[in-house]
Image: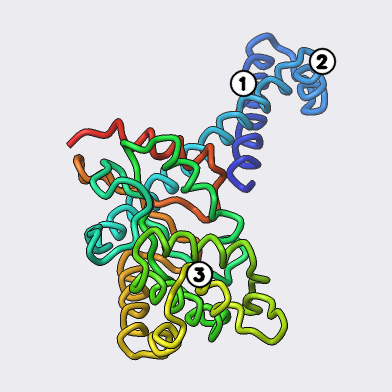
Amino acid sequence: MLDKTLLIFSFIIASLFFNVVQAQTTGTSPSTEQIIQSLEKSGALDRAIARGIERYRQKQINLARAQQEKEAAAKAAMAKNARAVDAKNDFIYGKPDAVISIIEYSDFECPYCKQFANAPIEVVDSMPNQVNLVWRNFPLPFHEPIASKEAAAAICVAQQKGNDAFWKFNDGIFKNTLTNGQGLPKSNGVDPLEALAKEQGVDIEKFKTCINSEAIQKQINADIEDGRNAGISGTPGVILVNHKSGSFQVLAGAVPTASLKEAVESLLATKK
């Protein structure tokens, strides 16, 4: 605002000076008020002010764009710290060897994650030969202890029944959770996670032992550390990686399906 005010003021002073000099050469001495009135009447003052404002606006837009590009580049650089996608260590929806991976750091108790849950699934289903979805746990402290328990439950289901069972269990949690640390609603006193696990045909006693194991917590902690190293601070944290070009892109939160697909298509076009 200060820059704009100075710009307008400078123009007025310059215009006054020009008119005064012109008046002196013709032997007349109009008053300042007369000069301003003349400028206003001709529309020159309004046009000059409009041009000054537009130049200021464009300058601010360019500065903001440059700042956004700088921040995006910094985020992409940090995203490269994410561990490599590996079907042996990751839960992958879609073809493991797809060119693009949508790496999602998520929290089962995050309402925005619940809102976003179907978006990457829909993108993968629409581009099955080009993109996959990689799940990594990132339970937030204020959603504990439920968020980590649900993450552990999903891992334990996968250990018994495999990758496909993980994604079915994942979908079941998001469809039923009350979010924000409230977990799944109980029915007839039955643990809702156990009930959901039974639908996948797991051995419940092994499942209960697994959930409370130190090894599972270490696996969750490894995902959290990986996310932090990659610059993730909230959920859903989404990183896109082109495995051929080595390009990365970081998305801001629960973007719409169309925006996610557009970002994937853009990254597909990147070259080494």
Mark 2 vs mark 3, foreground winner is 3
The mark nearer the N terminus, 1 or 3, is 1
Q: Residue at x 57, y 79 (%)?
A: 143
Please provide percent x and percent y for residue 185: 69, 76
* Label 2 vs 3, first from the N-terminus: 2
Which residue does the image show at 57% across and 44% down from the upper left? 256
Q: Classify 267 as above or below 162.
A: above
Front residue of 85/5: it is: 85
How far apart are labels 1 and 3 at the CA level? 66 Å
Res 107 label = 3
Q: Where's residue 158, x and y in %?
A: 37, 69
**Amino acid residing under circle 2:** Lys
Residue 6 percent coordinates (x, y): 61, 41
Residue 144, placed above or below residue 262? below
Q: Nearer the viewer, mark 1 or mark 3?
A: 3
Q: Residue at coordinates 58% horizontally, 72% vertically from top-left?
A: 109
The label shown at residue 18 is 1
Q: Secondary structure at mark 2?
A: helix
Please indicate whether residue 224 sits to the left or right of residue 116 in the image: left
Amino acid under disc 1 = Phe
Q: Nearer the viewer, residue 137 or 156?
A: 156
Q: Which residue lies under the disc numbered 2?
A: 41
Side (left or right) of 88 relative to 17: left
